[in-house]
Image (tube, rainbow, N blue to C red):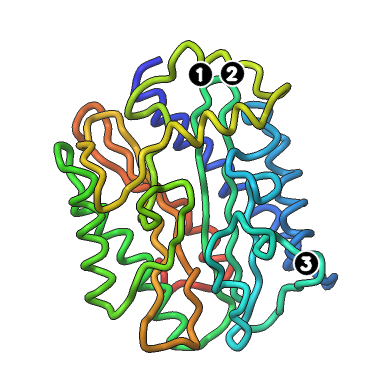
Amino acid sequence: MSEIDKLEICKQTRKFAAQSLYIVLKKLLKSQKPISEVILRDIWLSEMRKNKNIFPDGWYTPPPHGMIILFGDDKNIQRFDYRNARQEESWPREDVFLARKNAVIFCYASPVDNVTGIIGDFGITLYFGNNADMKQLLKTCLRINQDTFQFAKIGMRISEVTIFAEKQMDKYGMTNQIISYSDKTLKNIGHSIPATNEGWTDKEKKILSVGLKNWISAKDVISKKRFFVNAKEQIKIKPGVAFTIEPRPKVIDKPNLPSSLNYHTIAIFKENGEKELLTNFDDLFTLAGMSYMM
């Protein structure tokens, strides 16, 4: 399998996760029935499981099924000020319901191609209100991702990319709220798409090939294969590699604004020297009435 194939698999897997969320969220929003975090997660998961090219669950577990769903609104942001999504208090809940007006939601899934083990993570924050500060925060969060991607170049060290992103956040009076227990530095703005920087070993391939029978071992292989986009990583960007750009910027002097309104994007660097930022946000922005993000 060539490196360009890996990037295309990542791209299509992520695209499917985004399209599945759009399908289910559009249906749920038309309904008058209460929508809990667990309801959205379970229906989205069911829609994704229609794709027989991906494993039934995502690799990022816990939380259950490798998915994050968080609901809040303009005045209730407690769900978004979490330290790490792996902790049980941040898992989707049955008793937290979508506010039809002024809702803020974060949705994340971590699907995995069941032949290659390539992941296609997708995450988005949607806002259904009109608070000017909230809108500006969302635009700034996405802009930091975009500016960081534009800065990144083949041959550049990962640490340089991270330091640039940190300076961008500082410029906007923000700090990165990510706490990653898998990363020895604890702070990062993302991680590699496993097996794009270096291929799977024979042992890893064997474990992934029986992933349905032993998902715990398979998802651990994926997790441990990552390098982190942090300020100490000396790996250089090379053709064929892909990594996520997903900081969680918090406005330092505005504690009333949540800290997890992040956007999960993926930077891919093609064999021909071109690069592309995977977003897949536009349809969902339109659904939420977020034309200001387009």
Q: Quadrant of the C terminus?
A: bottom left
Q: Quadrant of residue 8?
A: top left
251 left or right of 88 in image: left
Residue type indicated by callout 3: Ser
Which sits earlier in the primary sequence, circle 3 or circle 1?
3
Give the SS element for disc 3. loop
Q: Quadrant of residue 148?
A: bottom left
The one of 293 and 162 positioned closer to us in this rendering:
162
Position of residue 142 relative to residue 109, above or below, is below
Q: Position of residue 252 (x, y in %)?
A: 36, 82
Is residue 114 toward the left or the right of residue 141 in the image?
A: right
Q: Quadrant of the N terminus?
A: top left
Q: Secondary structure at mark 2?
A: helix
Picture residue at 66% right of the left edge, 32% below the top: 216
Which residue corresponds to mark 2? 207
Circles 3, 1 touching at the beta carbon (< 8 Å): no
Q: Which residue is mark 1?
A: 204
The residue tagged 3 is: 36
Residue 25 badge: none
Q: Earlier in the sequence, mark 2 or mark 3?
A: 3
137 relative to 150 in the view: left or right: right
Asked if labels 3 and 2 touch by Cβ distance under 8 angstroms, the answer is no
Q: Are marks 1 and 2 in contact (CB under 8 Å)?
A: yes
Question: Alpha carbon of mark 3 to alpha carbon of mark 1: how far?
Answer: 37 Å
The residue drawn where x is 27% and y is 32% is 270
Picture residue at 63% right of the left edge, 44% below the top: 61
* C-alpha span from label 2 to label 3: 35 Å
**What's the residue type where badge 1 is placed?**
Glu
Dot 1, crowdedness within 10 Å: few (<14), some or many (≥20)?
A: some
Image depth: mark 3 or mark 1 in front = 1
Count of numbered tags: 3
Amino acid bearing label 2: Ile
